[in-house]
Image (tube, rainbow, N blue to C red):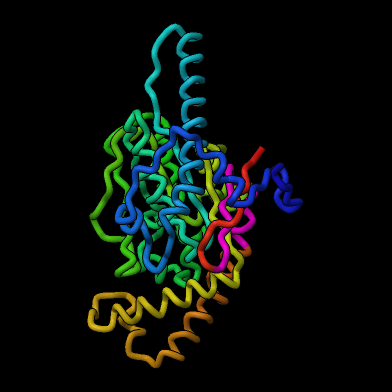
Amino acid sequence: MPMQNPELVPFLSFPASVWSSFRHSKDELKLTAEDVRRCLAFNDRISLTEVRDIYLPLSRLIWLYYNSRHSRSQVIQRFLGQSIESVPFIISISGSVSVGKTTTARLLRELLASWPTSPRVDLITTDGFLYPNAVLEEREIMGKKGFPISYDVKRLMRFIFDVKEGRGNLRVPVYSHFTYDVVPNEFTVIDHPDILIIEGVNVLQNGADYPDVRNHVFITDLIDFSIYVDAEERDLIRWYVDRFMKLTEQAFDDPNAYFHRYAHIPAWQAENLATLTWQAVNHVNLIENILPCRSRASLILHKAGDHRITEVMLRR
C-alpha cells in the first residue's frame, strides 16, 4: 500500500522499491550505459538500474496520460464532426538549482522517443527566456537571476501559447552555461513535436508568482504533466558547491568561461564564495519561489544525498 505524506496531500507516496514494480513486463529498456552517460548533466550521476526501476515506469505512466489526452481529442472531433489539429503534449520539469533537472529531462526525452509509436520529442529550458546579463545589470537585478523578475515571462508565455495553438517553426533563445548568458542571435527551432519537455526552475509557477503579468492563463495551465525533482537543502548545497568548484577548475585556462574569474583564487575562498552565493541567492529563491510550487506537480521525484531517487509521489 502506498504511504501518505501529510505535507504533500493529495499525493500517494511510494518507496523506490514499490515504484519499480509498476514497470510493465513488456516495457524494455532500450538505453545503454553509454546512452545514459550522455544524458548526464555536469556533475550528476545515475545508474542504468535506476533508469530501469524509476524512469521506465515513469515513461509508462506518461504514455498512459498521453494516450488519455489523445482519446479526449477524438471525442471532441466526433462531437464537432470535423478534425482538429493535434498539438504537442507538454511536460514540465522543475526543482531547485543543482538538483538534476537536466538529467531527468534528457533521460525522459530518450525514453519517450523510444515508444513503439516513435514520437518526436523536443526539449527546451526556460533559461533561454532569462533577460540577458546586460539587461539584468541595467535593472540592478543580477543578484536575482533565476527569480521570477529575471525572466521575460511574457515572451515565454507567448511561446507556450503558440505551441498550444499548433504553430510551427517557433524560435527559442539559447542560454549558455559556459558564458552564463543568453547567446545573441542563436535559437532552437521547435516545429510541431509530438511531445515537448520544458525544463526550468519556474515552470510550476502561476500568475500569483508574477503579479505584474496580467495573464488569465499561465504556464501551469498549459502543462499536461509536471514533474518536480526534490531533495533536502543540505544535499542541494553540497551538490552546488561541488559543481561550482569543478567548474572553476575546468575554466582555469579559458578566459571566455564565466567561471574563469574564480579559477585563480584559493580553493577555500572559492568554496566560501559558492556557499555564500547559495545562501544569498539560491536559498532565497528556493524558499520563496521554487519550493512553494512543489505541490502543484503531477509527480515528485525525491533524491537522497547520493543522488538516488528514494521516493516517488504521485498526485491522486
Q: Residue furthest right?
A: 6
Q: Which residue shows up at 52% across the image and 60% down it? A: 308
Q: Is residue 306 above or below residue 53?
A: below
Count of residue discs: 0
Report the residue at 30% width, 40% height from top: 190
Q: Quadrant of the N terminus?
A: top right
Q: Position of residue 172 (x, y in %)?
A: 32, 48
| Residue 255 in view (yes/no) | yes
> In the rendering, at what x and y percent does residue 252 appear?
28, 83
Q: Residue furthest top?
A: 81
Q: Is residue 269 above or below residue 147?
A: below
> In the image, what residue occupies the spot 36% across and 84% down?
262
Residue 211 in view, yes or no: no
Asked if residue 182 lies in the magenta stretch, the reply is no
Place residue 19 in its image quadrant. Answer: top right
Pick the front one: 14 or 248: 14
Q: Is residue 136 above or below residue 55?
A: below
Which quarter of the picture shows residue 118? top left
Q: Going by the picture, which residue comes out furthest to the bottom?
A: 266
Q: Which residues are magenta?
A: 288-305
Image quarter of residue 130? bottom left
Q: Residue at x 37, y 21 (%)?
A: 85
Image side of residue 222 versus residue 209, left or right: left
- Whole-percent x, y for residue 111 in the image: 38, 42
Question: Position of 6 compared to 256: left or right?
Answer: right
**Quadrant (top left/top right/bottom left/bottom right) for the C terminus:** top right
Q: Nearer the viewer, residue 299 or 77?
A: 299
Q: Which x, y percent locates residue 223?
A: 50, 39
